């Protein structure tokens, strides 16, 4: 299946932990990447290959992937973490970059 | 510092054409696959097309095949997207992005700021 399902929204209080899931058939067998998109801005890669962070991304962002669910966890959430988050997997052949449906994170 | 800067978007009538470019700096574009991703107003991300390092391989999402053409000029560190027979549903912000691959996966590690294309009569 080419569908990656994410919850439409996640709300979290400052200082708490947000967990964003990405569901797909046997997604644990693939590498999952995560992007943050703040309002009016381009997406930014925050986690690649399930758990790796690009240079400059805080350790508060972490990823996991197993079975049919991958997840992005944001610890000690800050107001600046608000935005939309997308998971993505790569597959060989047609439509190589498949994106999740996106999750809007709101900091209360 | 890696930078991708798109230019050339705008308003076009249905059936019209548009071409925009992505100028890269801070890295050698000839070493990377490059891709275009779009985002319709209020919607999610959709991969549109990509091109390999020397331009010999090009792939497109089904909805744009035969209408869009991706190309590149490594000497000018630029990637292009030529769009024709535009439809209202092509209205979106188009992002240029650099692809990075490891042994079994690819991801988009740098993105441009995006260019808005509005198809409307």
Image (spheres, coloured by chain):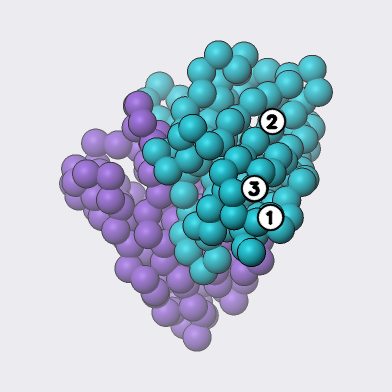
The structure residue drawn at horizontal position 53% and vertical position 53%, both measured from the top left corner, is B87
| Residue located beneath label 1 in the image | B12
Helix, strand or loop for disc 3: loop
Q: Does residue B58 appear anywhere in the picture?
A: yes
Palette colour of chain A: purple
Which badge, 2 or 1, comes first in the chain's sequence? 1
Determine if marks 3 and 2 fall on one subunit: yes
Is A54 on the left or on the right of A52, as rendered?
A: right
| Residue located beneath label 2 in the image | B79
* Residue nearer the viewer, B40 or A14: B40
Determine if marks 2 and 1 fall on one subunit: yes
Residue A86 % position (x, y): 44, 56
Is A68 on the left or on the right of A47, as rendered?
A: left
* Residue nearer the viewer, B98 or A16: B98
Palette colour of chain B: cyan
Give the numbered dot on residue B120: none
Helix, strand or loop for disc 2: strand
């Amino acid at each position: 299946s080419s569908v990656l399902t994410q919850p439409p929204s996640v709300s979290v209080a400052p200082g708490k932990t947000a967990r964003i899931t990405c569901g797909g058939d046997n997604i644990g067998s693939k590498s999952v990447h995560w992007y943050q998109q703040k309002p009016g801005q381009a997406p930014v890669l925050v986690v690649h290959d399930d758990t790796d962070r690009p240079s400059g991304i805080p350790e508060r962002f972490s990823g996991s992937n197993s079975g049919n669910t991958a997840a992005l966890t944001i610890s000690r959430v800050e107001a600046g973490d608000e935005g939309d988050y997308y998971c993505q997997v790569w597959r060989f052949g047609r439509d190589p970059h498949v994106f999740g449906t996106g999750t809007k994170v709101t900091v209360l | 510092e890696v930078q991708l800067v798109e230019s050339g978007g705008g308003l076009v009538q249905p059936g019209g054409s548009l071409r925009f470019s992505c100028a890269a700096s801070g890295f050698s574009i000839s070493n990377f696959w490059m891709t275009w991703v779009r985002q319709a107003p209020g919607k999610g991300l959709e991969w549109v097309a990509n091109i390999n390092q020397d331009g010999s391989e090009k792939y497109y999402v089904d909805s744009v095949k035969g209408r869009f053409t991706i190309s590149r000029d490594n000497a000018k560190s630029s990637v292009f997207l030529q769009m024709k027979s535009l439809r209202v549903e092509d209205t979106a912000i188009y992002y240029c992005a650099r692809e990075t691959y490891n042994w079994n996966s690819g991801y988009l590690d740098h993105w441009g700021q995006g260019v808005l294309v509005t198809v409307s009569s």
